């Protein structure tokens, strides 16, 4: 299963392979508007790609991690480059969709939920006059409830009706009928 860190690395790889995109950031989008610094405190350069994690959703055996991705550039004084900025940031978003669908191993192991992406343009009223597009996407992957993502060294007893199950590091190591173990000590050998 792909992790959040792997998703963010994938987005950063996309940005670093597009020489036009001068910066990459991740975190709270208000940082774009108030400080021109990303979550790590680095000064952002334009045009940029900025990723915001949205709530994660699940349904059945599917996990969907959602993101809003900002493609942003500064407008010139008077906004004479407005159409150019909208055109370029739209193309970055389309390139990212193609990259996620076809350009990586992610396309083989995960599904880009193409029915749920949304692209919207914006123009802010801040002093630095930012403009661009936001791309909202969900990356969906199978989610199995059979494995611990962060293994433990503890044994975990689980009682289910008349059975006792003992797990170690997410692996079932022993089963016993509860009727057979009443008032007894269970010795677990590894």
Image (cartoon, rainbow, N blue to C red):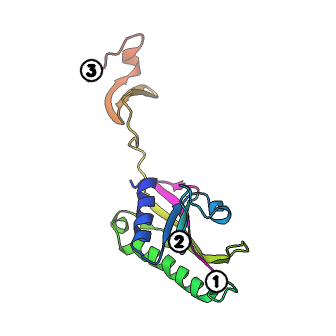
Local SS, label 3: loop
In the image, residue 180 lies at what x, y percent? 36, 17
In this view, the mark in front (1 or 2): 1
In this view, the mark in front (2 or 3): 2
Q: Is residue 42 magenta?
A: no
Residue identifier under label 2: 48
Q: Is mark 1 in CB contact (under 8 Å) with mark 3?
A: no
In the image, residue 138 lies at what x, y percent? 51, 64
Measure the C-alpha gap from mark 2 to mark 3: 56 Å
Q: What residue is at 34 percent from the left and 27 percent from the top?
A: 175
Residue identifier under label 1: 76
Q: Earlier in the sequence, mark 1 or mark 3?
A: 1
User: On the rendered image, what quadrant is the C terminus found in?
Assistant: top left
Asked if residue 175 is positioned above or below residue 7 in the image, the reply reads above
Q: Residues within 10 Å of mark 2 (few under 14, many from 20)?
A: many
Q: Residues within 10 Å of mark 3 (few under 14, many from 20)?
A: few
The span shown in magenta is 55-76
In the image, residue 89 lies at what x, y percent? 54, 79
Rendered image: mark on residue 189: 3
- Identify which residue, 115 or 134, lies in the foreground: 134
Q: Earlier in the sequence, mark 1 or mark 2?
A: 2
- Identify which residue, 10 or 39, lies in the foreground: 39
Q: Is residue 176 left or right of residue 92?
A: left
């Amino acid at each position: 299963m792909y992790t959040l860190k792997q998703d963010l690395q994938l987005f950063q790889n996309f940005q670093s392979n597009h020489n036009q995109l001068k910066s990459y950031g991740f975190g709270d989008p208000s940082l774009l508007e108030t400080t021109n610094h990303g979550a790590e405190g680095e000064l952002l350069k334009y045009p940029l790609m900025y990723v915001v994690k949205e709530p994660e959703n699940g349904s059945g055996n599917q996990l969907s991690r959602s993101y809003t991705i900002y493609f942003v550039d500064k407008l010139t004084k008077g906004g004479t480059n407005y159409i150019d900025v909208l055109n370029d940031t739209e193309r970055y978003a389309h390139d990212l969709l193609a990259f996620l669908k076809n350009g990586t191993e992610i396309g083989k192991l995960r599904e880009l939920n193409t029915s749920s992406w949304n692209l919207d343009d914006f123009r802010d009223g801040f002093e630095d006059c930012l403009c661009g597009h936001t791309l909202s996407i969900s990356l969906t992957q199978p989610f199995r409830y059979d494995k611990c993502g962060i293994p433990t060294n503890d044994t975990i007893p689980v009682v289910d009706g008349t059975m006792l199950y003992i797990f170690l590091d997410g692996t079932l190591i022993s089963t016993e009928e509860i009727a057979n173990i009443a008032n007894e000590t269970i010795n677990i050998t590894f």
